[in-house]
Amino acid sequence: MPRKAQYDVTQVLDQAMDVLLEHGYHGSVMDEIIARTDFNRRGFYIEFSSKQNFLYLVLERYQQIKLAPIIAHLNDSHGLRAIEHFFEQYIRLVKGKGCLLINCITELGFDDARIREMGRHYLDNLQFSFIGCLERALQHGEIRRDVQLEATALQLTCYVQGFAVNGILAANTDELKLATQALLGPLATGP
């Protein structure tokens, strides 16, 4: 009869996020991952088979518990305020450490097709969500009629990527908040 696992896989994945955010994929050594997740090496390879497969599961979990709740407000398409709310939450998420998914795309995206696919899927969904919010904002007169919705959504998506990187460097979030205001302010209709 097989023995019941003495660990919670989701808890292991959650704990590993911090290690990967601190050191990146290549900088995260197995000894630290094992120590910080209270796992053992044998159990790790039985459960995940490789560090790379482990990374994929961590990224899926990160998207599920960190990114999806932030994007949920965009998917409701509540106009310009939903976009502002997204950036407020995203800035809090990336402050001091960046975004795990964007960090992995930057580190591994050239060589790892699955990471590229995850990244492309995330960024495409984000762009479509921005388009929905901009369409709603246009319908409610929140933004100018001459705003190019698709181009603006692409610009917002690019900002998200830049914020993820800048979040590592920024000592505080004021400059990211100012950048958000500078980006969204010109879209709005007059007072």
Image (spheres, rainbow, N blue to C red):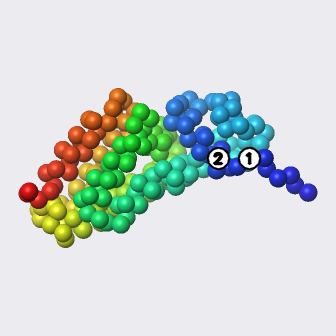
Residue 48 on image: x %, y %: 70, 47
Count the numbered circles shown: 2
**Can see residue 27?**
yes
Q: Are marks 1 and 2 in contact (CB under 8 Å)?
A: yes
- Asked whether the viewer can see residue 157, the reply is no
- Quarter of the image that includes the N terminus: bottom right
Report the side of 159 relative to 69 (left or right).
left
What residue sits 70% from the left and 49% below the top?
8
- Determine whether 35 is above or below 117 in the image: above
Q: Nearer the viewer, residue 109 or 35?
A: 35
Q: Residue furthest left?
A: 190
Q: Residues within 10 Å of mark 1 (few under 14, many from 20)?
A: few
Q: Position of residue 90 (x, y in %)?
A: 38, 47
The residue at which mark 1 appears reads as 7
* Residue at figure coordinates x 60%, y 40% from the top left: 16
At which x and y percent is residue 28? Answer: 59, 32
Mark 1 residue element: loop
Q: Which quadrant of the structure image shows residue 191?
A: bottom left
Q: Which mark is residue 137?
A: none
* Residue nearer the viewer, 116 or 34: 34
